[in-house]
Amino acid sequence: MRRRLFFLLPLALFAAIALYLGFGLTRDASVLPSALIDKPVPAFSLPGLAPDAPGLDDAALHGGVTLVNIFASWCVPCRVEHPQLMALAREGVPVYGIAWKDKAEDTRAFLAELGNPFRAVGSDGSGRVGIDWGVYGVPETYVIDREGRIRYRHVGPLLPQHVEERIRPLLKELGG
Amino acid sequence: MIVEFGHFALALALVVALVQATLPLIGAARRQGPLMALAAPAALAQFALLALSFLALTQAFVVSDFSVAAVVANSHSLKPLLYKVSGVWGNHEGSMLLWVLILALFGALVALFGGNLPPTLRARVLAVQAMIAVGFLLFMLFTSNPFDRIFPPPPDGNDLNPLLQDPGLAFHPPMLYVGYVGFSIVFSFAAAALIEGKVDAAWARWVRPWTLLAWSFMTAGIALGSWWAYYELGWGGWWYWDPVENASFMPWLVGTALLHSAIVVEKRDALKSWTILLAILAFSLSLIGTFLVRSGVLTSVHAFATDPDRGVFILGLLVLAVGGSLLLYAWRAPTLQGGGLFAPVSREGALMLNNLIMVTAAGTVFLGTLYPLFLEAVDGSKVSVGPPFFNATFVPLMLPMLAALGAGPLLAWKRGDLAGVLGRLRMALVLAGAVAFATLLLTYGQDGYTAALAALGLGLAAWLAGAIAVSVQERAGFGRPGATRRLLGLPRAFWGMTLAHLGLAVAVVGITGAALWQSERVLAMRPGDKAEIDGYRLVFEGVGAHDGPNYRATQGRFRLEDDAGRALATLVPERRRYVVSGMETTEAAIRSTGLGDIYAVIGAADANGAYTVRIYHKPLVPWIWMGAFVMVLGGAVSLTDRRLRVGAPTRARGAAALPADAGD
Amino acid sequence: MTRILSVLALLLWVSAAGAVQPDEMLADPAAEARARAVSRDIRCLVCQNQSIDDSDAELARDLRLLVRERIRAGDSDTAIRDFLVARYGEFVLLKPRMSSRTWLLWFGPLLLLAAGAAGLAVYFRRRPAAPATEPTLDAGERDRLARLAGEDRP
């Protein structure tokens, strides 16, 4: 009898492997979870899009629940998600922007064309601040709580269902 | 019209496969000759239908029939003919058709050459083979049909990925598939044996040529892929431990173990249930590999366009095939009687050691490849397991195996005398020591770690080569009269083994050199500039332009000189821009001698007109491919050994004269 | 989920010609060699399974420059890795660090080998030792053996 159990071992092992493989089918292998969840926003100070325009620094992200959107003018999905950001801004959600690896004049043109939902925009031409945030592509959207901690990162364009199912509930929960 | 015909042939093949999968099995259980006799013609018909289907798809690609979706996605009218043809399998749907075609090919081969198999076994083998075919044909017809039409047909196609437009890569998939899918027939033999309830020396004899065939092609396919990566991807890497590479390496490792353990079954009638398990495992790993490549579960440079729906289907096939066979194994294997006895230190023991290390190595690669997935399922965290892990774990496993490989083939069956064998191998030990010492001297000045590894690698290769020389000498007896006659009279299986092991030694030398002694220079060069590397000099003569059939290229001309200033070669690396996709590729210029490669790559020009030039000196790298070639040669030579191919023919004639319980 | 950068990176990867550009390289060869060694263990996050040393992607280049910057600033290799892990998670390291999560990975091969060796030991212990001599056959059995073996001699 024990000998028979021994022969069942390969099958048992395979069953476990098959379960894991099945699990693997349910996730998107390309999405990386943020390493900064529940950690404070990295300290940064970025210039604005014009010499006289105010930039963005981490101080602005303390004291209230905010959204930070990493975008660029050359990024096509950023255009797709822009209406959601405009809608959120119209509702009074504080949305801030970081233009990632973009030329300031191109960013200005982008916002002029599509509308500017951001209370302030920082221009991260070199992408170094993006690295501090753990950004690996655009667009990405972060939800920041009152204490200036990153609570959620959305990778890829913000589609209406993402806003409804993830962002709004979280904003409400955080008291924004 | 031809496309519809191809589609119809595919569907018809499914019907034939369904018949082949069921009726012969019933016939074998009930000992009904006519039902069993259906198997062979069905297998041949299935192959013929799939061959027609494949030809139909090829025709669509060759004439650039852009009403077929697969042709639009993967071809273009300007593409050279060779790549129009290789585009047939350069995509998911077409490669699946190639997959089932080769599956059917092996079934047909057994139908043609398996005349001396007992009818029940043959019927069952072909039935199991057909079951696999049914699964994959259903998969194709429902989710991955290469004959899907697109309306309206666009004027031209999207072109095949330029990286795939290369002779090496044109042949890599077919060869790899013959290996990958070839293990299916061994799997079928194992399942059939379990259903029969009998595994004996005869079974091992029948299985061995098929295992050799699959293994040889797999070795060739993997080596071809590795060589392609080396010369095409532009920085001379030849193995990345990429999940899809691992997916082909794992069946290869288990297949090697299977080859060796089948010998013990054949010679000594022992290790039966273990060998059956290995046969199931080899093809299971092929199936898991197919799943990994096509489901999107792991990121990989190789992955086809991923589709979770397809992944679910393949997972289902996997569960049925592997789960079913392992269930069969758990049920039937305990009834298999053990056979010959042997001491731990013996030829059988050495073969078991080979198995232990090969299977552990396969398990290690499996663990590393799938660990990120396992971990994420358990607690959601993501880790990367990359080349550093595999190099740190795989290499130490191989070292004791190389050491044992020298002595193993010289040990006697049943009970070996290790001390005696080592005494016979004195010369090999001395040679190994000398080579290791010489290597340490050569690498004096490099860091200690590199020097030690190099000495170990080359020393072990020398040990292996020396041991092989001793084993040949013992059999041929040079120095005594008649040596040549004895040499030529040695069985081909012995030559096959000798060549395969020698090929491994050669490859180890190449791997050692490639891993430890590569030099690189990265420079911004203008025409007229010179660069030096390891005693060679490269003079940048100038830039030119060149148009290919579907690309435009910038070429750099470099004169390679040795340290005395003598011109050795002209290297012309290219940077190509394919007109349809806009993709850019680099074509490295490689000057290869037996001892190493000089490898030059030209990049884009910067604002000042200086080109980024990368120059590599890669000592001993060609030995990797040469070693693989010799290994494949060994497999081929073994295949030509009449004993293995014929199996047990006289049994059929003599069996009638023997009492019923004889020989069983 | 289309991410423009992933697509862009893939296109760039296709054109890969090795990746370090002359303008990135450090002047000091020893430091540059160190930078290359560290880079080989850092994953390119927008590529399919490459290190930043091998990849042509822009993010890979940014990270390569970052690594060299930190070397110039005097950071140790471990500090550089910690810096990147703090921002991108353990995923960014191609060589997983030993932790409670990864000890199964690192010790796995050894465990497998031990299990296999144990299996072999059990196998040998279960069976009686091999006979020192071959059992002898009587005349009738020898005849039968000869008939069965026939031309089929291994």
Image: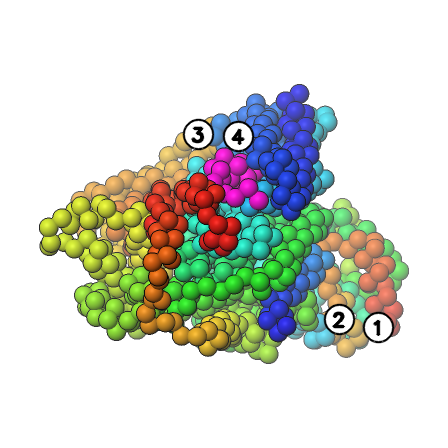
Q: Is residue B250 visible?
A: no
Question: Mark 3 is on which residue type?
Answer: Asp
Q: Nearer the viewer, residue C21 or B140?
A: B140
The residue marked by circle 3 belongs to what chain?
Answer: B
Label of residue B84 in the image: 4
* Quadrant of res B152: top right
Q: Which residues are magenta?
A: B103-120
Position of residue B133 relative to residue A52, above or below, is above
Question: Mark 4 is on which residue type?
Answer: Lys
From the image, tell me which residue sits under label 2. Answer: A151
From the image, tell me which residue sits under label 1. Answer: A174
Residue B271 in percent (x, y) is at 47, 63
Is there a contact, CB below 8 Å, between mark 1 and mark 2?
yes
Residue B44 in percent (x, y) is at 56, 32
Residue B7 in percent (x, y) is at 67, 29
Cα–Cα gap, marks 2 and 3: 54 Å
Position of residue B435 relative to residue B569, above or below, is below
Q: Helix or strand or loop: what does disc 1 sit on? A: helix
Left or right of residue B645, residue A45 in this image: right
Disc nearer the start of the sequence (4/3): 4
Question: Mark 1 is on which residue type?
Answer: Leu
Residue drawn at the location 81% of the way across and 57% of the way down:
A162
Is there a contact, CB below 8 Å, between mark 2 and mark 3?
no
The residue marked by circle 1 belongs to what chain?
Answer: A
In magenta segment, residue B462: no
Label of residue B383 in the image: none
Discs 4 and 3 share one subunit: yes
The residue marked by circle 4 belongs to what chain?
Answer: B
Q: Nearer the viewer, residue B501 or B485?
A: B485
Discs 2 and 4 share one subunit: no
From the image, tell me which residue sits under label 3. Answer: B547
